[in-house]
Image: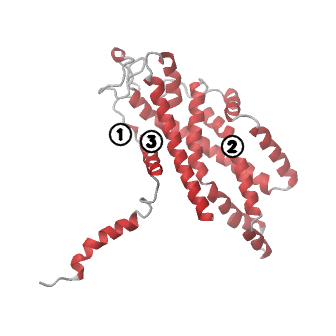
Amino acid sequence: MTTHSSDYAGTTAKPSALRHFFPAIGRTPFPVLLSTLLALLFIVAAVAPALLATHDPFSTDLYHALQGPSAQHWLGTDDIGRDLYSRIIWGTRPSLLIGMGAMAIALAGAIVFGFTAALAPRWIAGPVNRLLEILLAFPTLLLALLFVALLGPSASSLLISVGIGTAPGYARLVRAQALKVKGSGYVEAARALGHSSQKLFLQHIVPNVFRPLSSLVALGIGQSVVWASGLSFLGLGVVPPSPEWGALLEAGKINVTVAWWLEVLPGIAIVLVALSFTQIGRYVQQRSEGGQQ
């Protein structure tokens, strides 16, 4: 019986295709893979919480109030019998939206002020640098508290406050990277070839500033979620009955001595989000730095 090479094509193509389709999985550190899975899980919870929740997050049951974790209520119940697991799942959306929105505002401010401080004429760059130094003198939480006090406690004011509070630090990073790129050899060579200032900015400076700073997005989301939750815990952000994680912490602190899960478990969710996005951001940063060397 004769055989043809085509008879074995299917047996060799599949492993080869898999090796080419997942080239970096085996080289990716386990903490990064775990962080990526956690981040994807939180994103699914934010986009489609009904797929993961087991109860209505606002449904009350006074007969089962302050019950500990059980088969019926996986993470226990709060003081009016609402399922804590479902409330954490439904609280993922506002928590992540606030974190992402605050990061978007921070990046927008960092781009404007960072590039202005690095590339504008001295009479403009000087005052901008002094303004950034003044803002950096304030702790991030204190600066965010100032804007919350001006805007009032709400989800939108929390988003804006955290974004403005974290923007000065990112602006200094953008400024430092823009100055580094501005003085690089390839920019000087392009300038010697007669490229216009606009072309230098768009084709050389902007891409090379953003590439190493791309990791800031993941790092900033986790950080913003922590800051926003902290402000809500202080009663200056999202207020109950919203299931936003900081609001869950604020609502549960009254019963912390009799129902530890109301504080510990939402706090674990905040920590996991911060750790997962931070781990992803650091990995992207290391890969970016390694690619530049």
- Residue drawn at the location 53% of the way across and 23% of the way down: 250
Q: CA distance from mark 3 to mark 1?
A: 12 Å
Q: Is residue 234 visible?
A: yes
> Could you say where residue 66 lies in the image, as x and y percent from the top left?
39, 18
* SS at badge 1: helix
**Residue in the image at 68% along x and 35% along y:** 140
On screen, residue 61 above or below 280 = above
Kindly indicate whether the residue at mark 2 contacts the one at mark 3 (C-beta within 8 angstroms).
no
Q: Quadrant of the N terminus?
A: bottom left
Which residue ends up furthest to the bottom in the rendered image?
2
* Residue 30 falls left or right of residue 180: left
**Amino acid type indicated by mark 2:** Ala
What is the CA distance from the residue labelled 2 to the residue labelled 1? 35 Å
Of marks 2 and 1, which one's residue comes earlier in the chain? Answer: 1
Query: What residue is at 46 percent from the left and 48 percent from the top?
Result: 31
Tell me what residue is drawn at x 54 percent, y 53 percent: 283
* Label whose residue precedes the other's in the sequence (3 or 1): 3
- In percent of width and height, residue 160 lies at 64, 37
Query: Whole-percent x and y of residue 205?
Result: 71, 63
Q: Name the residue that disc number 1 marks.
A: 51
Task: Give the number of the mark in front: 2 or 1.
Answer: 2
Name the residue that disc number 3 marks. 42
Quadrant assignment for the C terminus: bottom right
Do labels 3 and 1 touch, CB within 8 Å? no
Label ID, residue 138: none
Inspect the image, locate mark 3, and give the three-letter code of the amino acid beneath it: Phe
Residue placed under numbered mark 2 in the picture: 167
Question: Up-down: is 280 above or below 262?
Answer: below
